[in-house]
Amino acid sequence: MTKKDERKKAELKPEADGERFLSRAEVLDITGVTYPFIWKMIRAGEFPAAREISDRRICWLASEVRKWMQSRPRRMLKGMEAA
């Protein structure tokens, strides 16, 4: 299985203990945005900051990324009423 296949398999479902870490590649794949966009959002305080799990590795909590995704406003199309 390639790394791309592994990332595709990554979901925002919590692990058995209720939480998991997401790598940078997983966050990019799940959110569909670029790292420069995430970096800009982190600096503006609008995206959860990464956590250091070692000197050379960072990750995000899946629950924080999920919460950010759910907080994004829905785009209303012409003629739609707000729910």
Image (spheres, rainbow, N blue to C red):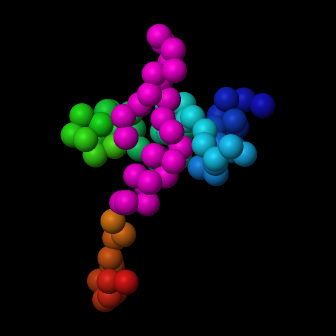
**Direction from residue 36 to residue 62 in the image, left or right:** right
Q: What's the residue at 37%, 60% (across, down)?
A: 71
In the image, residue 34 above or below residue 69: above
Image position, residue 74 (x, y; %): 36, 69
- Is residue 80 shown to the viewer in this render? yes
From the viewer's side, name the closer residue of 57 and 25: 57
Image position, residue 24 (x, y; %): 49, 31
Image position, residue 79 (x, y; %): 31, 89
For the C terminus, give its image quadrant.
bottom left
Q: Is residue 63 magenta?
A: yes
Q: What's the residue at 24%, 34% (across, down)?
A: 43
For the N terminus, give its image quadrant.
top right
Q: Quadrant of residue 51?
A: top left
Outermost residue to the right: 1
Q: What's the residue at 64%, 51% (across, down)?
A: 13
Q: Does the magenta stretch include residue 49?
A: yes
In the image, residue 82 above or below residue 11: below
Identify the magenta region.
48-72
Q: In which quarter of the image is residue 26?
A: top right
Q: What's the residue at 31%, 33% (across, down)?
A: 39
